[in-house]
Amino acid sequence: MSINVTELLADPDFLDSFCVTRQTDPGSFVNGIWTPGEPTEYRFRGCIQTPSSGEWESLPESVRERDAILIYTKCELQGEKRGEEGQPGYGGDIIAWRVRKWKIVGNPDSWQHRGYVKYVAVQLEAGR
Protein backbone atom coordinates (compact mmCIF):
# COMPACT_ATOMS: atom_id res chain seq x y z
CA MET A 1 0.00 0.00 0.00
CA SER A 2 1.44 3.38 -0.97
CA ILE A 3 0.90 6.69 0.78
CA ASN A 4 -0.15 9.76 -1.17
CA VAL A 5 2.26 12.36 0.22
CA THR A 6 0.31 15.25 -1.29
CA GLU A 7 -2.69 14.31 0.85
CA LEU A 8 -0.47 14.53 3.93
CA LEU A 9 0.89 17.90 2.84
CA ALA A 10 -2.67 19.21 2.53
CA ASP A 11 -3.74 17.80 5.93
CA PRO A 12 -3.81 20.56 8.60
CA ASP A 13 -2.63 18.02 11.19
CA PHE A 14 0.73 17.81 9.37
CA LEU A 15 1.20 21.51 8.55
CA ASP A 16 2.99 24.09 10.67
CA SER A 17 2.50 27.83 10.53
CA PHE A 18 5.59 29.97 10.23
CA CYS A 19 6.40 33.64 9.77
CA VAL A 20 8.58 34.72 6.86
CA THR A 21 10.53 37.97 6.97
CA ARG A 22 11.57 39.09 3.49
CA GLN A 23 13.77 42.03 2.57
CA THR A 24 11.81 43.19 -0.49
CA ASP A 25 13.28 46.69 -0.46
CA PRO A 26 17.09 46.60 -0.35
CA GLY A 27 17.28 50.24 0.69
CA SER A 28 18.74 53.39 -0.78
CA PHE A 29 21.19 56.18 -0.18
CA VAL A 30 19.71 59.04 1.87
CA ASN A 31 21.95 62.12 2.02
CA GLY A 32 24.91 59.94 1.03
CA ILE A 33 24.28 57.33 3.76
CA TRP A 34 23.05 53.82 2.97
CA THR A 35 19.70 53.22 4.64
CA PRO A 36 18.38 49.63 4.62
CA GLY A 37 14.82 49.10 3.45
CA GLU A 38 12.07 47.84 5.71
CA PRO A 39 11.42 44.07 5.71
CA THR A 40 7.98 42.63 5.00
CA GLU A 41 6.45 39.81 7.06
CA TYR A 42 4.22 37.03 5.72
CA ARG A 43 2.48 34.05 7.36
CA PHE A 44 2.69 30.72 5.55
CA ARG A 45 1.98 27.06 6.21
CA GLY A 46 4.01 24.03 5.27
CA CYS A 47 5.37 20.69 6.39
CA ILE A 48 8.70 21.11 8.21
CA GLN A 49 11.01 18.14 8.68
CA THR A 50 14.59 17.46 9.69
CA PRO A 51 16.85 16.18 6.90
CA SER A 52 17.49 12.44 6.69
CA SER A 53 21.10 11.33 7.02
CA GLY A 54 21.36 11.06 3.20
CA GLU A 55 19.89 14.52 2.70
CA TRP A 56 22.20 15.89 5.41
CA GLU A 57 25.27 14.50 3.64
CA SER A 58 24.18 16.08 0.35
CA LEU A 59 24.06 19.58 1.88
CA PRO A 60 27.08 21.88 1.36
CA GLU A 61 29.61 21.60 4.16
CA SER A 62 29.05 25.23 5.19
CA VAL A 63 25.38 24.41 5.77
CA ARG A 64 26.16 21.24 7.75
CA GLU A 65 27.90 23.35 10.41
CA ARG A 66 24.46 24.42 11.68
CA ASP A 67 21.11 22.76 12.30
CA ALA A 68 18.97 22.55 9.18
CA ILE A 69 15.32 21.94 8.35
CA LEU A 70 13.45 21.06 5.18
CA ILE A 71 10.32 23.04 4.36
CA TYR A 72 7.72 21.58 1.99
CA THR A 73 5.28 24.30 0.96
CA LYS A 74 3.29 25.74 -1.92
CA CYS A 75 4.53 29.21 -0.97
CA GLU A 76 7.40 30.78 -2.84
CA LEU A 77 10.35 31.32 -0.52
CA GLN A 78 13.52 33.12 -1.52
CA GLY A 79 17.14 32.23 -0.99
CA GLU A 80 19.90 34.81 -0.94
CA LYS A 81 20.28 36.72 -4.20
CA ARG A 82 23.37 38.55 -5.27
CA GLY A 83 22.82 41.92 -6.91
CA GLU A 84 23.90 42.78 -10.41
CA GLU A 85 27.10 44.80 -10.67
CA GLY A 86 26.61 48.03 -8.76
CA GLN A 87 23.23 46.91 -7.37
CA PRO A 88 22.51 45.53 -3.90
CA GLY A 89 21.35 41.95 -3.45
CA TYR A 90 18.79 40.48 -1.09
CA GLY A 91 19.33 38.21 1.89
CA GLY A 92 17.40 34.97 1.99
CA ASP A 93 14.01 34.79 3.68
CA ILE A 94 14.13 34.46 7.46
CA ILE A 95 11.75 31.87 8.88
CA ALA A 96 10.47 32.14 12.46
CA TRP A 97 9.39 28.66 13.57
CA ARG A 98 9.23 27.16 17.05
CA VAL A 99 11.08 30.01 18.77
CA ARG A 100 14.07 29.75 16.43
CA LYS A 101 15.02 31.69 13.33
CA TRP A 102 16.11 29.97 10.13
CA LYS A 103 17.45 31.32 6.84
CA ILE A 104 16.56 29.91 3.43
CA VAL A 105 19.77 28.92 1.66
CA GLY A 106 20.17 28.54 -2.06
CA ASN A 107 17.40 27.91 -4.54
CA PRO A 108 14.54 25.47 -4.12
CA ASP A 109 15.42 21.82 -4.40
CA SER A 110 14.50 20.02 -7.57
CA TRP A 111 11.89 18.06 -5.57
CA GLN A 112 8.56 19.41 -6.77
CA HIS A 113 5.31 17.50 -6.64
CA ARG A 114 1.80 18.83 -7.28
CA GLY A 115 2.76 22.41 -6.54
CA TYR A 116 4.86 21.72 -3.43
CA VAL A 117 8.51 22.71 -3.34
CA LYS A 118 11.24 21.67 -0.89
CA TYR A 119 13.48 24.36 0.60
CA VAL A 120 16.47 24.05 2.94
CA ALA A 121 16.88 26.47 5.84
CA VAL A 122 19.70 26.72 8.40
CA GLN A 123 19.44 27.97 11.95
CA LEU A 124 20.69 31.53 12.38
CA GLU A 125 21.96 31.03 15.92
CA ALA A 126 25.19 29.02 16.17
CA GLY A 127 25.27 25.66 17.88
CA ARG A 128 23.77 22.24 17.46
Image: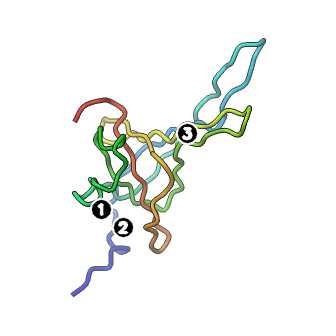
Q: Dividing the image into 4 quarters, which one contains the N terminus?
A: bottom left
Q: Dividing the image into 4 quarters, which one contains the C terminus?
A: top left
Q: Determine the CA span between mark 2 and mark 1.
A: 7 Å
In the image, which is nearer the foreground, mark 3 or mark 2?
3
Residue drawn at point x = 50 percent, y = 70 percent: 115
Amino acid at the residue labelled 2: Leu
Secondary element at tag 3: strand
Q: Is residue 124 above or below residue 56?
A: above
Q: Position of residue 58 (x, y in %)?
A: 33, 56
Q: Determine the CA span between mark 1 and mark 3.
A: 25 Å
Tell me whether circle 2 and circle 1 mark residues in contact (CB < 8 Å). Answer: yes
Along the line of sight, the residue nearer the viewer: 78 or 52: 52
Tell me whether circle 3 and circle 2 mark residues in contact (CB < 8 Å). Answer: no
Q: Is residue 39 above or below residue 106?
A: above
In primary-sequence order, the first of circles 1 and 3 is 1
Q: Quadrant of residue 15?
A: bottom left
- Residue that label 3 marks: 22
In primary-sequence order, the first of circles 2 and 1 is 2
Q: Going by the image, does 99 lie left or right of 40?
A: left
Secondary element at tag 2: helix
Q: Position of residue 99 (x, y in %)?
A: 30, 35
User: Which label sits on residue 9?
Assistant: 2
- Residue that label 1 marks: 14
Q: Is residue 125 above or below residue 21?
A: above
